[in-house]
Image (spheres, rainbow, N blue to C red):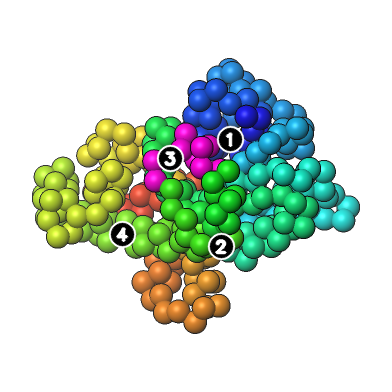
Amino acid sequence: MKIAFIGLGNMGSGMALNLHKAGHEVSGFDLSEAAKKFHAEQGIRVAGSAKEAAAGAEVVITMLPASQHVEGMFIGTAEQPGLLADMPAGTLIIDSSTIAADTARKVGKAAAAKGVDFIDAPVSGGTAGAAAGTLTFMVGGSDAALERARPLLEKMGKNIFHAGDVGAGQTAKICNNMLLGILMIGTSEALALGMANGLDPKVLSEIMRRSSGGNWTLEVYNPVPGVQEASAATRGYTGGFGTDLMLKDLGLALENAVTAKASTPLGAMARSIYAAHSIGGHGGEDFSSIIKMLQKQA
């Protein structure tokens, strides 16, 4: 299958490579020269532009930073039309970015007007899950579009959930990431408290992991360096899910909560904490670096 993969960053890289390894003809594009060079070395055809990557593709997959990038990519402006302007009917779009549900619906409506299938399929599982092909996909779209996408999603993930119509995948994702952001702060607080009292973070992590405080951050994403070999914390808080990305997702959750008149006090507080961490110069670090705000300094 001819696939255009646009956005070869920390998450998109592993996803595109898994499709390539599965035998699909992948044409990739990214603004980063380093990303383009790396993927060319891995055997992926790297295009000179998103438009070039999408030319002749049966499926276009995007993994972009924010709502404005996705809308600009597909809809564009009168002066600079997006990919939908030249996209033939029958093409399938899989957008795995984390964006506002309203943006997903706007792009989905524009795609439908062109006879193009669109699903929003944001992911969970981190860079390790992207590399291993074990991501969880939260999908919004029609049953028929999902079934078209399923064989490809199965090469990139192990869990595929159909949340509802276009936009529902994004809503599920922001609910998940709001919870994750809250859990990381709580886990970091608990570990910092234990360490301030002289406890070994490895021992304390194992105690809590096997007790009522157990959660995903303790299982696979411990915020203390050296506790888990493959964690972003052990890599100097690099190569994971950035603080600014978590801040963006918590902002989306807060916007959605205002629109839905839902009460999310912990989500709002978590957003403020990550905002302070970002202002402190840690926006590019993995979000687990939030423990730095909470640790007793030597």
Which x, y percent locates residue 66?
Answer: 60, 54
Residue in front for this viewpoint, 177 or 138: 138
Does label 2 or label 3 sit earlier along the sequence?
3
Q: Which residues are magenta?
A: 149-159
Q: Nearer the viewer, mark 4 or mark 2?
A: 2
Q: Which mark is residue 165?
A: 2
Q: Which mark is residue 8?
A: 1
Residue in front for this viewpoint, 155 or 39: 155
Q: Is residue 261 above or below residue 167?
A: below
**Marks 3/1: CA distance?**
17 Å
Q: Nearer the viewer, mark 2 or mark 1?
A: 2
Magenta residue check for 234? no
**Marks 2/3: CA distance?**
20 Å
Residue in front for this viewpoint, 112 or 281: 112
Within 10 Å of the Cα at label 3, are there few (<14), some (14-19), or many (20+) other Cα atoms? many
At label 4, which amino acid type do we have?
Answer: Leu
Badge 3 element: strand
Which x, y percent locates residue 4?
Answer: 66, 34
Within 10 Å of the Cα at label 4, are there few (<14), some (14-19), or many (20+) other Cα atoms? some
Does label 3 or label 1 sit earlier along the sequence?
1
**Marks 3/4: CA distance?**
23 Å
**Marks 2/1: CA distance?**
27 Å
Badge 1 element: loop
Does label 2 or label 1 sit earlier along the sequence?
1
Q: Is residue 284 above or below residue 163?
A: above
Magenta residue check for 155? yes
Q: Which mark is residue 183?
A: 4
Which x, y percent locates residue 209?
Answer: 17, 50
Q: Nearer the viewer, mark 2 or mark 3?
A: 2
